[in-house]
Image (cartoon, rainbow, N blue to C red):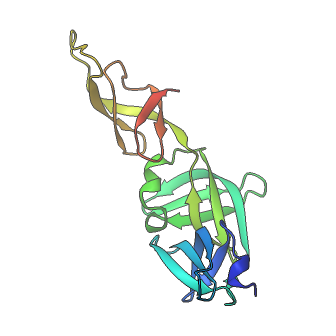
Amino acid sequence: MPAANDIRKGQVIKFNGEPHLVMETQHRTPGNLRAFVQIKMRNLRYGKALDQRFASTDTIEVLPTDKKTLEFSYADRDTFAFMDPNSFEQIELTATQLGDLKNFLAPGGKVDVLFVDERALSVDLPSTVSLKVIESADGIKGDTASNVQKPAKVETGLVVQVPLFIKEGDVIRVNTTDGSYLGRA
């Protein structure tokens, strides 16, 4: 097992029996004290972030990881199915595993899935996704003040604030970090 000095950003380590993704590491050597490593990490099962201090000589278990690009196939109640486009193998994740990311999943969309010990643990979306507007109120003629927006419901159920000229059937680009409208696709 590697020492705490050898841990790098992006690795998955086992801490308190749970897999944690290392987001940041800092090696510190205070004046008259022993060196230590400050690691900022996120629990991959629950999403909680924490800071932990390790002595530079502590050994830490690094878990083997694999990242695959999968295609979203369909949603069935609380289950979301993803398919590997190369092997056609299907992987199912629950709504609780996906959290708010499920609002950005359109059929055929590609996502990166992180596997730890052959189990899918986290999903990374692209920075933008294209979604079809299924419900939107008509803009009022003459209401063209600068930057007037209206709510529009997209195919995943997400409600996005869009400009008045967007109508039902339009495909729009949405930012996956904050759910904001970026433009027409």
Image point (42%, 26%), residue name: 169
Please identify the quarter of the rendering in which residue 159 is found: top left
Seen as rendered, the residue at the extreme front is 31
Position of residue 130 in the picture relative to residue 142 (left or right): right
Position in image of residue 112 (x %, y %): 64, 55
Q: Percent from the top left, x then y, of residue 18?
A: 55, 83
Q: Nearer the viewer, residue 76 or 122?
A: 122
Residue 31 lies, with reference to residue 76, above or below; the image says: below
Give the residue at x 58% y 46%. 126
- Horizontal relation, residue 1 to residue 124: left or right: right
Tell me: residue 4, above or below residue 9. Answer: below
For the question of whether residue 155 can be seen, the reply is yes
Residue 98 drawn above or below residue 178 = below
At 35% from the left and 18% from the top, the residue drawn is: 165
Residue 100 located left or right of residue 89: left
- Which image quadrant: the N terminus? bottom right
Can I make out residue 43 in this image? no
Q: In front: 4, or 49?
A: 4
Residue 82 lies, in percent from the top left, at 61, 57
Q: Quadrant of residue 14?
A: bottom right
Instruction: Give the number of marks.
Output: 0
**Residue visible at 54% across and 89% down?**
16
**Residue 124's image quarter?**
bottom right
Name the residue furthest right: 86
Residue 128 lies, in percent from the top left, at 53, 40
Most foreground residue, 175 or 146: 146
